Amino acid sequence: MTPTPQDPAGDAAHESPGGASFGGAGADSTDRTTGSPGSDRARPPSRPLTDDRLRVELDRRWRGRGGAVPTDRIAAAVHDRIAGTPQEPRWRLSLRAWAPRIGVAATAVAALLVVALAGLPLLTDIQRADIQRGGPGTHWDPAERPLTADELSRLFPRDGSSPFAGRVIIAEVGLVEVLADCVDLPCDLAIDGIDPMILVHYDPDRTVPAPRTGETFAFRVREDRGLDLVERARSAPLRLAWTVPGLADEVRRVDQFDRAVPTVYLVDAWLVGSPPPSCPAPFPIDSPAPPPGLDVGCGPAAWLTPTEEQPVKGDATSIEVGAPRDGLRVQNGAYDAYAPNPERGPYLPGIETPRRGLYLVRRNPAGAESCFMCTPLGDPLEIVARVDPLTIPAGPSTTMPPATPFTSTWNPAIGPLSPKELFLLVQAAAAGGPRGIVAARVRIQPTDKIGCLNGVPPCRDAVIVLDDGSTSIDVVGWGTGSWADVVPAGPELVALGLRDDRAVLYLGPVTEPPSGGGAWTVPQLLAEPRPSEGSLYLVDAWIVDVAPLRCRAPIGTTPPEPNRDVSCVQPGWLTPTAEQPSRSDPDNRSVVAPLDGIRVQNGAYEAFAPDPVLGIIRQPRHGIFLVRPFTVEAGQCFACSGGGPVEVIARVDSLTIPAGPSTTMHPATPSPAGSPGTTLGLSFEGLVEQGCGSEGGCAYFVRVEPGGGSSTPDTSWLRFDQTRDGLTAPAEAPVGVSPGAYRVSARVNWVSDVILNSGPALIGGVVASCQEDVAIAPSVGRIVLRVTFRGDRPCEIEAVVAPLPAPSAPPR
Amino acid sequence: MERELVERARRGDREAYEQLVRRRIESMVRTALAILGHEADAQDAVQEAFVAAWRRLPGLRDPERFDAWLGRILLNACRMTLRRRRGVREIRMVDAGDEQAGPADDRAGRFDQAAADADAFDRAFARLPIEERALLVMRHRDELPVAEIGARLGIPAGTAKSRLFHARRALERALAREDRP
């Protein structure tokens, strides 16, 4: 931190934008007009911050300069942008309920036989691909997400009973009615999109309310390839499991608005219990006892708490039970019924040891009236089940897998992605595949943001052009200013975020480790004499921290940004080994920091550690972390005795890279009437009625994707070759196509007339584009996809069918 | 009616979505303006928020919560706008006339107190993270109940309350800093 004439203490850079550190907190546009040198000059002190002043000032900001909001212009811009923006599909196979009729059934059986015979090689490939992906099994952590239909199907072997019988699971699936089985009774339900069918059993006295698709349900697994419906489950905002305070808030909200809808919640909590106190009869002798799940009267009480809190205190002669203030009361006896490994504490006979778990709960409004030792946090709940993690067996899936087989894995510790690998990951992310932070060695070409003025789409900042020049990846993330001042000129190692719109988010250049490979070690980074503040580093390390400390905030300083907070509250480090920092007293600041560790911001462990353990003992976790050094004032970094501080920006995980496009197109789902094994000829034609008006020329692209909401990317953008005779399809264009539904897109980009250092011409923004859904029926002949480009007006796509040549007459 | 529009938009009806957009542009822009303090940025953030919301609309589970959900998306858009801004630093050019003017104290006397207050407030407000700005705007400008603020930010009401307290404290400290000679 360097003192300046305007800031003798040198502390402005800690907070103000554009200082010596990386932006600092709150760098908004207001600073740009008022944060000038000399703005600290003396003036009368401003009025104190009363409620009234706060409201007046915020209202002034809210009104702006008093001008009208350009509603029409914004509405028009949104209109244009969503016109070319598809919604993210909630993809699931739709296996409709069916009511067989003999004639239809016979036809269907015949058609299925034909399809099965013709598609045998394809199905074999699909199964092989699936087995390749399956591996030894997938770990399911219920706290994070529900099971998918595909994972659910793997819980049931094709033969024999399920090894998971009796377990409670949560899955996001659709339920469909099986119409053939219900005449006078409620219809049976089955899981949508799974074959052979998995039946869902439920209480016949009640119906399962709509909606039944795309919802999260809790089930108990049966032995007979069936599930018992427990209830619809409501997930927490960021993951499946709720925290205790979050659940209390949610239940209060539900009480106000939609208490009629039965719902269960998964809560990540400690289950604590007390031994039965001596108490009078919990209810009058002549009234019936409440069911075990609803009994919250005087008895062996239990609570769900956010921490390992013990409600029982005392010594060998007497004990005292107190309801935990931040806990939620659950039914009596819940500890014995649901705690994992329930046990009595060693130091006081009969006292139960708190157990952490994922508990499925629902409201217990009946107990609210006569609740014994309830807590101020909320009304009592009923624990329905405990949901434990499980390993989903690998093996053939019974839902339809994507057509593209997965072939390789990128490990960030080994090295950066190539442009081609990056391209495949971008395509996969756009189709619902994994997103994340990656490091790649690419050349980024600024596009001067053509088409981006005044928010008019398409708005692209820069592109990464693949080596063969045929395809490109949009790069966004800088906003304003010139990319040319920011991005490296040549191929450089950069950090990028995979987005869902076929673009990547630019994070910045990454400093390469001195010994090659993909990531720095902690000792290497500690030995770096002056880690560059403006650069990013990938570090292969263990992340550790300690449970929150009770400490005094520094006096006279403004609060730091959350991601730059290195005060004493909750210190964390990156370390070369799985060492645990030691702490002598939780109530003071006696922490022994790892000397060979690098200090990271408070809370980094919780935010970035894989599978963090958030109890008193917090297990070190290993990963590859993207970090950025920053500076703080002397004395402001608590426990920085090793190195640092650095800001952890992301964890960089391994990713599976899908295979490249095949030269034959397959639809997302086989055409029901056609034969998916049949391949028809496919060719492309490009016609230019009018150019794009650029001095440097134009670049014409076409893309064909499987339609029907598929998440399967099949081809990338293909660039037409330009010859004196017009446009011709590139060599890598697919030459065959299977019957089915496809989406064809085309676009023309301008090309810069400035060529730097004899490099390739820079491709600019999109001038015009168009899109067409095409259905290809079986046995129609040869398909020609013809694209006509008309300057800055939308292009036009036609699918022309060239009839098959007539069979030649048999020789006489 | 609103619910029906949301349902239709969720099924891909662009016309229905545009109706929803039109009804909300003004309030969204003004909220973003209060948070960001810059008109063009606010309009950009709102535009980004509407496009992002369109893309993710099929994932919205409860149409009744559309506005709260949209508010969260707007907040993210504001955050992204601010993040992009961090790389940009515009420094006001000092006019020659300014340099030749008298001592700062003399000119301070000519300051309109309200304008000076507003200036100090804006600079102090700019030091707060986006979440804290949003909390203050929702509570003190829009006068939303704490429970609703929590719902919009996806945090429990108790957490919203304590963060609101901290945001207020942070703003007070930042203002005090502005008053330092």
Image (cartoon, helix red, strand yellow):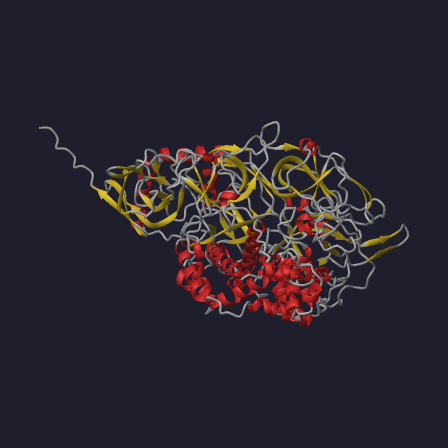
User: Do we see residue A394 in this rendering?
Assistant: no
| Location of residue A322 (image quadrant) | bottom right
Residue at the extreme left: A812
- For the N terminus of chain A, the quadrant is top right
Task: Residue lying at the far right in this picture: please name it.
Answer: A317
Image position, residue B3 (x, y; %): 48, 66
Question: In this view, which residue lies farthest toward the front?
Answer: B100
Q: Quadrant of residue A579?
A: top right
Number of marks in the image? 0
Residue drawn where x is 54% and y is 68% of the image: A65
User: Going 71% across and 32% down the picture, which residue do you hit?
Assistant: A577
Q: Position of residue A126 (x, y in %)?
A: 42, 36
Front one among B50 and A527: A527
The residue depicted at 69 percent of the width and 64 percent of the height is A367
Tell which of A728 and A450 is nearer to you: A450
Instruction: Name the quarter where the C terminus of chain A is drawn.
Output: top left
Q: Nearer the viewer, residue A474 or A594?
A: A474
Left or right of residue B40: residue A707? left
